Image: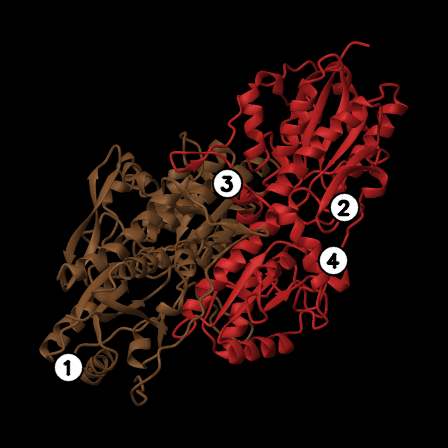
Chain colours: A red, B brown
């Protein structure tokens, strides 16, 4: 059989290591020219396939592709776009088949979270039904670490490392300032529905009264009165208090606390932020001087302090995805298997796309201390292996060297397609 | 003459390298036991001297002292406290002399910004007048880079590096997301009165349309209408827009824009933040989807990505301070002298405390582009040398190893002293 081309796409929020997975895909594909022709990358994810906007990665040098391993963001562009069911959007599925046929695409690699795996699974089925079977392999990714089956999601370990390191650093700063200035620091981190990232802040603690003193998880409803009491108790006991708060912290009614009902002079509702919201409460109710930080993209783009374990795993799932395809597998994705806890040994396993799609894995309750504000030893033991090793990018002139693609586009063969 | 003891204190906001200066002081003092006895560090800065709360650094091992070079925060505690004039607070000056006499302190090293150098200068004069002359040497420090005479302030280079690296990383993330999601990102950085830190974000730019697209400096009054037009133009042209904003951005009336007049349901004024304030304007007026980050302590505690140049300079000024004292100098501080621009060569010079005290150095106007939103080539050439080199701390179990002091206190000899 002559080689067929491959399509690779990035989906959802990007991470500091999703390009390492891309690197794994492209480098591995280049080793099998007898089976895989060119790797086309969707410009802005699956939208790039629908609109026939594809980057020809064969135009990129080996050196550029290698650099992807140390480049954060999503080099080909990602998208927040989910294919609906075949019944609802049959035209889009048909368009995909048309594009795949036109460009002789026989492999589809979809690098994303649970949603993307659902999409990949639907495409596998549809293309088979249409008589143009495309091998569809998922590649796991999400900083939220909320995919089932896999031991962790590539992307998470590096955010966890950034948050743990930053928590330790902020804690030392606060410790130096509290005597005459800042008493409370609130560090807001990602995690809309699962507290994995906030939990990673807990790794910074070495001794009982070390920061962070309080962690707010989306899984534990926020009890304002109790929280303020905990903050005050901590300031009284330790002298200061450091809080790591999930952006997804919700009140007892399940409402995001950042949705604070603030209004400006014209009565417009203002967007909040968990950290400033908490700081306003602490300042007003306890009269403590506070500082706060909101990390947002800082944390998920922080390739400069990526976890070497995470980078290795991200690369490995990209590589394995291609190997799965070459081995004739379909409708599956590589996952991380924890072979041994101490020492941490992992390997690549295999899961069905349908088992991963749209399932959200929360933090086990036994990783959170009984009072709801801490990380247990079990949680610590689980998380610590994921932040091991420092994968530093190369630097030039004081700044990290990140890949800059030529981004040569594949010549279009079809008429334009409008996305609803 | 028998050796006399030394007093060292940290003052003001801490940095990721102020402990490197402490390391320089203590290691150098240890090499001269014939002239310097013990180094006592003020617990919480000068307050530690007034209240006779001093840490005996001689109880710390050489290994711990060496670790200070890679430890952020202020290991002995800092303070926001400024001695008033002798006329206003004579009792405090007399107390200092009493403490210095009781503990045979003949050297005073004050590690801080312009305020601290003023204090050190006053103490030098007062102790001489009182017949117990203490050699007072300043050690420059401030992330704001607003000290005069010195080429830069130790502490600034590392913040600049963090901000430059983070700006490049966030820019790549945004570039991947803008097609279907976030169009504008606002990254809030420190700098109450001077735009040096925001300017460092400009170092991330390599090509014309690279992020950051707009920099807001405290030196340039914020013109909301023009800013919103610039953001929209950038989104139209590039597809997305990244803004680096100083916390000290002020409106045309000189009022901080973060003082946004927001009120909660009870009519309490809410603390803002420049980033969320700007994002609210952009969302409401332009309807663009935004994300934002506020770095706060993250940036000044980020020892994990410190500038090697900055660490070297911070250590060097600590070392030089002791050498100055041993050479019989008084009322001076070591400064960084730029010997050559390309290649960047620096040396240690000397300045009078009185010339550095209470002078705030702003960004030269020619470092800011004419439109007020960019960094010029001159600014770039000036800043780039300061972020050269990566000084990585050691890691253990995935986290940086930072010094943990025994913190043995010097036995008190005097009665209690209350600070006003």
Residue found at the far top of this picture: A2
Which residue occupies the foreground of this view, B308 or B341? B308
Indicate which disc residue B169 carries: 3
Residue A420 visible here = no
Q: Which residue is mark 4?
A: A363
Residue B163 horizontal/vertical position (percent): 42, 47
Disc 3: host chain:
B
Alpha carbon separation for disc pair 3 and 1: 52 Å
The reply to whether discs 2 and 4 touch (Cβ–Cβ < 8 Å) is: no
Place residue A247 in its image quadrant. Answer: bottom right
Disc 1: host chain:
B
Which residue occupies the foreground of this view, B27 or A171? B27
Alpha carbon separation for disc pair 1 and 2: 69 Å
The reply to whether discs 2 and 3 touch (Cβ–Cβ < 8 Å) is: no
Which badge, 3 or 1, comes first in the chain's sequence?
1
Question: Which residue is drawn at the image coordinates 71% and 26% (left, top)?
Answer: A50
Q: Which residue is mark 2?
A: A338
Judge if badges 1 and 4 mark residues of a common chain.
no
Question: Which residue is drawn at the image coordinates 65% and 37% (left, top)?
Answer: A312
Which secondary structure, mark 1?
loop
Q: Residues within 10 Å of mark 1 (few under 14, many from 20)?
A: few
């Amino acid at each position: 059989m002559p080689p067929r081309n491959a399509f690779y796409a990035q989906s959802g929020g990007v991470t500091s290591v999703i390009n390492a997975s891309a690197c794994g895909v492209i480098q591995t594909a280049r080793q099998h020219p007898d089976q895989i022709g060119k790797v086309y990358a969707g410009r802005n994810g699956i939208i790039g396939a629908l609109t026939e906007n594809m980057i020809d990665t064969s135009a990129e040098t080996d050196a550029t592709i290698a650099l992807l391993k140390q480049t954060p963001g999503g080099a080909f562009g990602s998208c927040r776009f989910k294919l609906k069911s075949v019944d609802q959007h049959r035209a889009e599925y048909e368009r995909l088949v048309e594009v795949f046929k036109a460009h002789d695409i026989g492999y589809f690699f979809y690098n994303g979270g649970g949603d993307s795996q659902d999409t990949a699974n639907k495409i596998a089925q549809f293309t088979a039904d249409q008589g143009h079977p495309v091998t569809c392999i998922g590649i796991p990714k999400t900083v939220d670490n909320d995919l089932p089956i896999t031991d962790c999601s590539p992307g998470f370990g590096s955010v966890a490392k950034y948050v743990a390191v930053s928590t330790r650093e902020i804690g030392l700063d606060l410790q130096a300032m509290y005597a005459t200035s800042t008493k409370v620091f609130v560090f807001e981190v990602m995690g809309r529905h699962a507290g994995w990232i906030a939990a990673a802040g807990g790794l910074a603690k070495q001794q009982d009264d070390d920061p962070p003193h309080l962690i707010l998880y989306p899984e534990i409803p926020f009890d304002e009165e109790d929280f303020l009491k905990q903050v005050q108790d901590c300031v009284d006991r330790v002298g200061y208090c450091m809080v790591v708060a999930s952006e997804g912290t919700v009140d007892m009614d399940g409402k995001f606390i950042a949705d604070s009902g603030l209004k400006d002079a014209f009565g417009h509702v203002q967007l909040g932020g968990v950290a400033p919201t908490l700081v306003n409460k602490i300042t007003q109710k306890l009269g403590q001087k506070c500082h706060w930080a909101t990390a947002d993209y800082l944390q998920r783009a922080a390739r400069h302090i990526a976890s070497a374990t995470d980078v290795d795993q991200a690369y490995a799932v990209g590589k394995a995805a291609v190997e799965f395809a070459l081995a004739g597998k379909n409708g599956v994705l590589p996952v991380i298997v924890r072979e041994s806890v101490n020492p941490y040994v992992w390997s690549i396993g295999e899961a069905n796309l349908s088992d991963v799609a749209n399932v959200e894995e929360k933090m086990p309750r036994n990783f959170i201390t009984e009072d709801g504000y801490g990380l247990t030893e079990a949680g610590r033991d689980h998380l610590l292996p994921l932040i091991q090793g420092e994968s530093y990018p190369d630097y030039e002139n004081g700044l990290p060297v990140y890949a800059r693609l030529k981004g040569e586009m594949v010549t279009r063969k079809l008429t334009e397609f409008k996305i609803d």
